[in-house]
Amino acid sequence: MDWFPLYNSIRIAAVSTALVFFLGIFAAHYIAKAPRLVKGALDVVLTLPLVLPPTVVGWLLLLVLGPRRPLGAWFLETFGLRLTMTWPSAVFAAAVVSFPLMYRTARGAFESFDETLTQAGRTLGLGNAYVFWHVQMPACRQGILAGTVLAFARALGEYGATSMVAGYTPGRTATVSTTVYQLWRTGQDALALRWVLVNLGISAAVLLAVNLLERKEGRA
Amino acid sequence: MTLTARIQKRCGSFRLDVDLAAESGEALALLGASGCGKSMTLKCIAGVEQPDQGRIELDGRVLFDSEAGVNLPPQKRRVGLLFQSCALFPHMTVERNVAVCLGRLAKQTRRQRTAELLALLRLEGLEGLYPRQLSGGQRQRAALARLLAAEPRALLLDEPFSALDSFLKWQLEQELRELLEVFPGPVIWVSHDRGEARRNCRRVCVLEDGKSAPAADMAELMANPGTVSAARLSGCENFVPVRPGPSPGLAEVPTWGLTLQTAAPWRKGVRTLGLRAGCLRPAEEGAVNAFSCRVLRAVEDLFSMRLALRPETAAPGAPLLWMELSKEVWSALPDRTRLLAAVRPEDLMLLE
């Protein structure tokens, strides 16, 4: 059995989660404090990928990243890199689709955070960045951790947008989810079942990790 | 060293308009009912809220000046703010909470200074505990230790004991007073408890609906409040509309159908008569300012009785007149449904 799809899926999910982790926290931090109107508008835009069909997200991504589109063409010309049909393009798809999960959970955590802790830190002479990373982030740890795990799980299972943007090339862009589809389509049910089992195993492990984290949090 | 603050800020329909000054080595009480802008005032001085207009100065350093466009970040103000909620960092131990504010020191001196502060606030043995494992008093002491670690030039205390029970409160208050005695800078002590303010502050600034009155001597304010809000804060229970009587030294109270002798001369702007429950006493027939009342209710307090009275001559719907008297006097009263109450002319407060 060729394990490349598993390696590729994890690689894509890991890079996209790292990206979404910082972007999501950044967005959540600013939007949690934004005026009501701005908050409402940005919230809709940033949450859209959660409710849009992944194929719509994929189509929109192709509109931006395609080799004949401005950004895709510029990238191809400048760096000689295609932004579609490669494994990094799957990262875009996974990141866009999993971003709302990170953003929304982090925002919830920031909104329920006691603002007087930040104020206390600042009046005590601690720098704003220090207060954010050493006071606010640890206090919101649970929400941020939950968001990260959810985003990772979502990125790992991403199929629709990925298949449109990265396609299915064995050994290059194939992921676990696109492989299962491909195997089923070509009638290789036995092999498909193996990958299904792998997928079930990973998902169960992720959920177990979340539960363990929550229990640890409850004890601390 | 002086702290002066002139602050104007609008929050929705609420307007904050404060003007106050505290000398170094002095604790100025900022007294007011809940929601009158006390905490907001402190936050503006500490720099975590921004006034719309005004000027804040500490030891000649301008912390905020809307006209000159100065707005120092809280980190540079060196103003310590003790929050009502303590605001200890929940995921840090007591020791870490203090040490984190000593980042400017070398490791060795930092450890030493942390130990000193913890000892000063009697927190030895609790270094390794998290804030949620502490009692309310310990939490407040830890917050104080942390505050002192930052070496503030001025201290702002936001109802420091509001979360404590009365015994703990009394103990901690004594400790805090000892600390403040050696603190060289100005202190602003926010409170809604007149007793706490009276015990710890010589001067007081009364805040009503976001507007501050000129600072007054604490004892003077208690004896002679001048305005209804100050009288209410000084603990006065009875307020009733008043108008000048037929001759000087007389005041007419239409609600109760009474004309009373006052010691204070009538002044312009007076609309309300203030009468402390404890200043009313049972009297003999013919005493000055005596009037007959029915006793509507008798409430037993810890060490006294509180009576709800209605003067016989009162108009229908007149507010109750509260009287406080010792339990001995109450039990010696011949008739507990009706009594003759009197008040000395000097105990009647004419209020604006």
Image (cartoon, coloured by chain):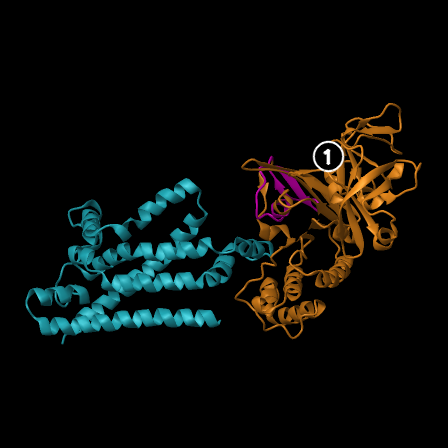
Position in image of residue A2 (x %, y %): 14, 74
Callout 1: few (<14), some (14-19), or many (20+) C-alpha neighbours within 10 Å? few
Count the labels in the image.
Answer: 1
User: At label 1, which amino acid type do we have?
Assistant: Ala
In the displayed structure, does residue A150 sit left or right of residue B101? left
Q: Extreme left residue here?
A: A187
Can residue B24 be seen here? The reply is: no
Q: Quadrant of residue B274?
A: top right
Give yes or no for residue A146 being in the magenta stretch.
no
**Which chain's residue wears label 1?**
B
The residue where tag 1 is placed is B318
> Which chain is orange in the rendering?
B
Residue B301 percent location from the top left of the image? 76, 54
Numbered range of the magenta stretch = B41-67
Of the 4 image quadrants, the one containing the C terminus of chain B is top right
Q: Tag 1's secondary structure?
A: loop
Question: Is any atom of residue A164 visible in this view?
Answer: yes
The residue located at (24%, 73%) in the rendering is A201
Residue B72: where, in percent of width, then height? 59, 46
B84 relative to B50, above or below: below
Q: Observer-nearest residue: B15 or B276?
A: B276
Task: Give the colour chain A carries in the figure.
Answer: cyan
Return the x and y of residue B303 as percentages of the image width and height: 80, 56
B318 on left or right of A125: right
